[in-house]
């Protein structure tokens, strides 16, 4: 009786497995059939070697039959329940005859026959064998050994093997399908050797199947058998290209299979027979996008594994434009929405900042000096320079509810310009990607790009992936005490304008600065102005416009790059000076808006005194802020009570001596000048009539009368220094100095 079936696979040059028609409740039935009257050389295994030409014989039959529909006639069954028969191609050709003719099969000695008409079949096979022997084809070729160099088990270094062949398409044959995404593969290597490996498809995972030798009670996962059949019907014993891409934790090779008919991984996903897995999806040569798109298609259609899938309901307010106003940590920012001005904390979705290294300053440390080990500081600085004050587009990916003492968080993808900020952090090794649970859809919308960025950072050994020691950042608190501040004051003042970063704003005129060049942190007070006080608690009332001044300075300066000029240091260690942001004097800006008042004593000492007074006059004229109706009287009273400087007074003077461009002596033009001139006249007359005292022994600091060389007049003086050149004196009434002999 003639039957039809599809050849599933070829076990050897004379034995095949036939597959029937698919059944509605499972994979089709299978049937093993050996070719009657012929035999092929045996293939090797882990326990024995190939017989000569065993592989070539198998390959002849594999290429001839696998995946094709054939006709077969069962003829007899041996005592070992092995069934023998004949197989015919669609065109009617007998497979035994084709194999014998090609020299890959030989006639079985003592072939079993059931009737005399079968003798004709044996005679025909004998004739074909004689012709093959004469032509020296197939196994009858005496110039070939027919022995292949194959390793049935992998005993090499998998990392070295991967490095050698990674990314290179290798000729291969799929020998076994364990489940929809795991195979036993024969690699046909370029050096004419062969290697059997276990290969897992990168980026996907199909349901597992029950092993043939599994214990009783073991079952396949849902859709496992269907996925296995799906792959077997397309790839089993087909010639393919395998691209090795990585290794699993169990040292199993991970890679992709290239076939002219398409990508089997994408096909499995699109049919709902597999799911994407994060840990290997970035290894896929085709990239994550085609795999995710295929899975998305199956989800939308609710196919097989996704039959119970429920899509997340989109919200109307999950995307908005905002301005970054503060960097909270290496993975969190504070933004203010463009429409409505609402402040929101945003955590970057699916990433986390680098861990704090051992030896870092504890938050509860008594010392205000900072020591940070690791990449957290660098991550915050990168975000500050890139984002602070910039407009971004925020797309909320998921909401993380409050738990274990942590507040609820909105986790989002933040785009600045055309760049995904989280991706840029990961790319620089300044953040790592969170590995979500397999079925957890609460993840960044561009999660695969984050994984690819992390893979690249690992390859380039960037940031946290570097084998080098963790970087250490040390910042000294120069304002920890007044004595410490005075040590820093000299060179900070001498440096002129210094670049700084505003770390904190206490009120409109008091800030905390980090000065990178000197690697120190200082408490800083704006010179020449006083901002209204801000209440520290809900019961502590703020002064008028105190909160407005704080908000203005915070918005304008917090975490921005600024320039400062240090002018003085106060008794508690705070540094006093001027602050400029983009060349704009912050004290002047506060005064112009009526958010501060002049502090006369320090304003008079400032290099910008005219600008300060002019700005306050402008605010008064325009009645802005503190100078509005009903508030200005209170401000005037406050300034009167708090001012510690002297009243402004203009006097007439005569410059008596100029020492340098910034130092000179003056005499007040008052009635006291006439008294001084009379005194000088009396001194001159008295000492001119007296001889010099030979016993006089001058000492530094003595008050004396000295004879000025230009007019030979006598004036009051103080001895400054005594040397072999003479005695240096300072004329205390005029400010000039000269060196004289002891006789004068």
Image: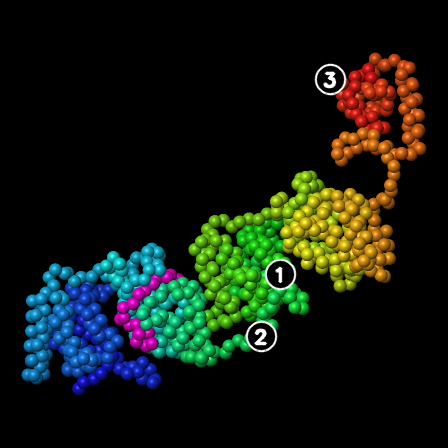
Residue 234 visible in the snapshot: yes
Residue lying at 81% horizontally and 47% vertically, measured from the top left: 600
Image spot of residue 664 (x, y percent): 79, 33
Question: Along the horizontal axis of the image, is 383 left or right of 573?
Answer: left
Quadrant containing the C terminus in the rendered view: top right
| Quarter of the figure with residue 504 | bottom right
First along the sequence among labels 1 and 2: 2
Relative to 471, is 276 above or below? below
Image spot of residue 205 (x, y percent): 40, 70
Q: Which mark is residue 315?
A: 2
Relative to 709, is 28 above or below? below
Q: How is the image coloured?
A: rainbow
First along the sequence among labels 3 and 1: 1
Residue lying at 30% horizontally and 57% vertically, measured from the top left: 156
Q: Are marks 1 and 2 in contact (CB under 8 Å)?
A: no
Magenta range is 229-253
- Residue at the disc numbered 1: 324
Q: Secondary structure at mark 1?
A: strand
Q: Secondary structure at mark 3?
A: loop
Image spot of residue 657 (x, y percent): 81, 29
- Residue at the disc numbered 3: 724
How far apart are the two marked residues, 1 and 2, measured between alpha carbons?
23 Å
- How crowded pointer 1 is (Cα within 10 Å; few <14, some 14-19, many 20+) is rated as many
How far apart are the two marked residues, 3 and 1, measured between alpha carbons?
70 Å
Relative to 421, is 571 above or below? above
Question: Along the horizontal axis of the image, is 192 left or right of 145?
Answer: right
Question: Along the horizontal axis of the image, is 602 left or right of 381?
Answer: right
Q: Is residue 699 magenta?
A: no
Image spot of residue 285 (x, y percent): 38, 64
Front-lying residue, 566 or 261: 261
């Amino acid at each position: 009786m003639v039957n039809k079936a599809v050849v599933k696979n070829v076990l050897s040059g004379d034995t095949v497995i036939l597959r029937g028609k698919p059944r509605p409740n499972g994979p089709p039935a299978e049937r093993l059939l050996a070719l009657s009257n012929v035999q092929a050389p045996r293939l090797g295994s882990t326990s024995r070697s190939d017989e000569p030409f065993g592989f070539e014989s198998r390959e002849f039959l594999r290429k001839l039959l696998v995946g094709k529909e054939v006709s077969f006639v069962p003829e007899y069954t041996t005592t070992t329940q092995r069934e023998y028969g004949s197989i015919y191609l669609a065109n009617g050709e007998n497979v035994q005859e084709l194999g014998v003719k090609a020299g890959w099969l030989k006639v079985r000695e003592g072939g079993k026959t059931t009737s005399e008409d079968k003798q004709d079949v044996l005679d025909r096979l004998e004739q074909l064998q004689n012709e093959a022997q004469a032509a020296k084809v197939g196994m009858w070729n005496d110039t070939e050994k027919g022995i292949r160099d194959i390793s049935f088990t992998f005993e090499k270094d998998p990392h070295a093997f991967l490095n050698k062949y990674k990314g290179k398409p290798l000729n291969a044959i799929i020998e076994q399908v364990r489940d929809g995404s795991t195979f036993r593969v024969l690699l046909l290597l370029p050096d004419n050797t062969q290697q059997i490996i276990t290969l897992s498809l990168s980026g996907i995972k199909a349901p597992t199947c029950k092993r043939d030798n599994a214990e009783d009670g073991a079952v396949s996962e849902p859709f496992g058998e269907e996925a296995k059949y799906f792959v077997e019907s397309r790839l089993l014993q087909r010639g393919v290209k395998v691209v090795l891409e990585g290794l699993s934790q169990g040292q199993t090779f991970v890679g992709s299979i290239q076939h002219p008919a398409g990508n089997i991984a994408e096909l499995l996903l699109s049919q709902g027979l597999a799911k994407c897995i994060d840990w290997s999806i970035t290894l896929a040569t085709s990239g994550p996008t085609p795999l995710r798109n295929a899975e998305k298609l199956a989800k939308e259609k609710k196919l097989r594994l996704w039959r119970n899938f429920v899509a997340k309901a989109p919200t109307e307010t999950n995307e908005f434009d905002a301005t970054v106003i503060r960097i909270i940590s290496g993975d969190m920012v504070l933004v203010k929405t463009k429409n409505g001005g609402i402040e929101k904390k945003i955590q970057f979705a699916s990433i986390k900042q680098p861990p704090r290294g051992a030896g870092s300053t504890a938050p509860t440390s008594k010392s205000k000096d900072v020591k940070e080990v690791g990449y957290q500081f660098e991550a915050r600085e990168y975000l500050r320079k890139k984002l602070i004050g910039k407009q971004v587009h925020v797309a909320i990916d998921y909401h993380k509810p409050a738990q274990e003492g942590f507040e609820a968080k909105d986790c989002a993808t933040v785009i600045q310009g055309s760049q995904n900020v989280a991706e840029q952090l990961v790319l620089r090794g300044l953040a790592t990607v969170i590995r979500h649970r397999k079925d957890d859809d609460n993840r960044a919308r561009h999660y695969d790009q984050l994984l690819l960025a992390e893979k690249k950072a690992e390859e380039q050994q960037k940031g946290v992936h570097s084998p080098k020691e963790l970087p250490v950042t040390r910042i000294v608190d120069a304002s920890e005490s007044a004595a410490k501040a005075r040590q820093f004051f000299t060179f900070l003042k001498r440096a002129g304008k210094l670049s700084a970063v505003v770390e904190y704003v206490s009120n409109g005129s008091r800030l905390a600065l980090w000065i990178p060049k000197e690697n120190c942190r200082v408490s800083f007070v704006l010179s020449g102005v006083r901002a209204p006080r801000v209440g520290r608690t809900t019961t502590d009332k703020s002064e008028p416009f105190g909160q407005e001044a704080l908000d203005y300075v915070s918005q304008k300066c917090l975490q921005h790059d600024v320039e400062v000029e240090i002018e003085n240091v106060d008794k508690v260690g705070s540094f006093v000076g001027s602050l400029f942001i983009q060349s704009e004097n912050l004290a002047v800006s506060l005064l112009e808006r009526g958010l501060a008042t002049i502090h006369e004593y320090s304003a008079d000492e400032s290099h910008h005194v005219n600008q300060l007074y002019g700005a306050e006059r402008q605010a008064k004229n325009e009645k802005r802020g503190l100078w509005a109706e009903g508030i200005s009287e209170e401000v005037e009273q406050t300034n009167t009570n708090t001012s510690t400087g002297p009243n402004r007074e203009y006097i007439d003077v005569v410059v008596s001596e100029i020492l340098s461009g910034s130092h000179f002596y003056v005499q007040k033009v008052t009635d006291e000048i006439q008294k001084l001139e009379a005194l000088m006249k009396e001194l001159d007359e008295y000492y001119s009539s007296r001889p010099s005292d030979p016993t006089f022994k001058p000492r530094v600091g003595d008050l004396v009368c000295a004879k000025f060389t230009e007019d030979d007049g006598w004036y009051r003086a103080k001895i400054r220094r005594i040397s072999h050149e003479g005695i240096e004196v300072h004329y205390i009434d005029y400010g000039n100095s000269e060196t004289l002999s002891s006789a004068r």
